[in-house]
Amino acid sequence: MFDSFLAGLGLVLTFPTFFYLLAGIAVGLWLGVVPGLGGVTGMVVLLPLTFGMDPAAGLAMLLGLFAVVSTSDTITSVMLGIPGTIASQATVIDGNAMAKRGLAQTAFGAAFASSAFGGVLGGLAMAASLPFALWIILAFGSPEFFLLSLLGLLMVGAVSGNAISKGLGAAALGLMLSQMGYPVASSMPRYFFDQRVLLDGLPLVPVILGLFGLPEMMDLAARRSAIAHISDTRAEDDGILNGIRQAIRNRWLVVRCSLMGVYVGMLPAIGSSVVDWLAYGHATQGAKDRSQFGKGDVRGVIAPEAANNAVLGGSLIPTLAFGIPGSGAMAVLLGALTIHGFSPGRNMLGENLDTTFSMVWTIIIANIIGAAALMIWGRQVARAAFVDGNFIVPAVILFIFMGSWVWEPGMFTWITLLGVGLLGYVLKAAGWPRPPFILGFVLGPVLESALSITWQSYTPMEVISRPTVIGLVLVLGVVFAFALRSTRRGLAEHSIENTVETKASLLLSSGLAVLLAMVFAGAVWMALDWKLLAKLSPISFGVAGLVIMGFVLLQDRVRLGRIAAARAAGDQSAGGTLAGFVADHGRQMTLLAAVTLMVALTPWIGTYAAILGFAGLYAALWGRFRWWIVALYTAAIGLVLYGLYDRVLHTPFELPFFM
């Protein structure tokens, strides 16, 4: 086996394989920065180019691309508060908070160092785990998948501070919205309201970009300032090397989260969507001082970045050993293997073992090179935190909307983006954490599939007698106890999303809870007459949502009572004023209205005119730039729109009505 391990290294380092690996790394670094593209898009675009290549070169280019996407997506998460990919959701929380404090370079240094180590350890752990990988994968059946998904959701609630009920409520809403369209275990479509476009459910990328991207751009536009909230050029102790030192100081956290990423990554369809939250929750629970989590704690960057880069090594094991792709990227890789004449299973672990180990070396080398390149480049990227936000907003709006359009072309995609963007902003203004919503939306089908299979295939005694089920239940109990203790003590200092709590925001929160209770009740009522497997999950999620909304209303009532008591005691400023709340959010609504107008005009004037018109008017009227800056800026937006989305990605644009 050791000879094959060295032979795999030789395959990667030979020419032209190493050249193609570098090309894949370069494309992957770029794709990770652009919201909405990601590694799967890149692999699909590059796959046809590998048809005539040597197998080792083609696989090196594809894996090199995908290995570094979860490293460079940190840039978007830190600088803009938008997850570059689904694996970087948790990085947004403390990474973006660090950028706002002028510590973007420190966040980058810690993230890139942790990502490199996680990727290297993931590759090595993959190689070491091949002999017993079968036991690990077979030990996890549908009951374990259900409990692990539940653990991920509960972990988000556990780090929501004294907003645990709102965090779980947001997760319940995400779970319920994931039930739209055809279910995984039945042929009966649900909640599609006679709209054919909803038969496949809501598209994922517009939901992610809308939930995080639009609210952050609305805030940035309203502030009329840079991303960083400090007046000088940067914090005194900010630097890439300082971030690397922080990662080294927390090296055991990096090791633990990397191993977590490897072994959770082995589980098909669940690894990348939950592992960063498990790592983030582990970091908060294991910390003696949790006061800075959610406000810019570097450990909140280190843990998820180490875990999400290690996932690739773990996810390769079921793909290569059993032909079970655990994600869209692994499905593309499986197709590449088939095209080049490889058969997953015994062949990849026997006569083609050197090719398997070449993939291990590809992951290791790509992570080292990618992290090193980003560390060199990170200083320049971090300066964007101090650039006038009016330069940033139109460009990011372009990437948000076109990234969604690439995923699923059509006006419904943009309407979804707008709707979820408004929901995301309301959640933020009401003090509800947004990350649990997206995790619930992603894990909904996984939970439903696991619950349906468990319901049909296992008796209750068979479920509770499984050792892995017992172990996961114990872990769930520990996490739940931690969440209850946090709520009882009112620990808001490590909430995953910090908001200013006022009387108006609490009233908005209560109103939202009442509205969602009606939504959950209506969803349960609609599902009562459906077939068992079609209604099992919606009714379960709906009932859970109703119970959680009761706790939200109770919690808000207690806090409103405290504000009323403070005012009665003479503090008339307690809780703020409704007029002040409206004034604080007026500019954000103006930007949302402008973006909505852009979307509404697109079917009439076309994609080019709508986006360029928005960018030009924003720069002229909102940014108040000089005419020649407006012209150059709009031309640059048009060049990106034409060069990247039209010519490279061949995106089908909306044409004007007269064409």
Image (spheres, rainbow, N blue to C red):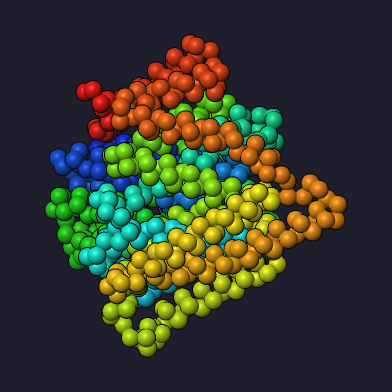
Residue 374 versus residue 574 in the image, above or below: above
Please identify the quadrant where the C terminus is shown.
top left
Q: Residue at x 56, y 18 (%)?
A: 624
Left/right of residue 419 with respect to residue 654 in the rendered view: right
Q: Residue at x 28, y 79 (%)?
A: 456
Left/right of residue 367 with respect to residue 318 in the rendered view: right
Q: Residue at x 51, y 78 (%)?
A: 474
Residue closer to the observer: 437 or 38: 437
Please identify the quadrant where the N terminus is shown.
bottom left
Which of the 4 image quadrants contains residue 268?
A: bottom left
Residue closer to the observer: 329 or 360: 329
Q: Is any atom of residue 311 visible in this view?
A: no
Which of the 4 image quadrants contains residue 569?
A: bottom right
Residue 209 point in image, percent of width and height? 43, 43
Residue 153 point in image, percent of width and height? 48, 64
Residue closer to the observer: 647 or 262: 647
Residue 353 point in image, percent of width and height? 24, 59
Residue 572 versus residue 520 in the image, above or below: above
Residue 73 versus residue 168 in the image, above or below: above
Q: Residue at x 52, y 25 (%)?
A: 391
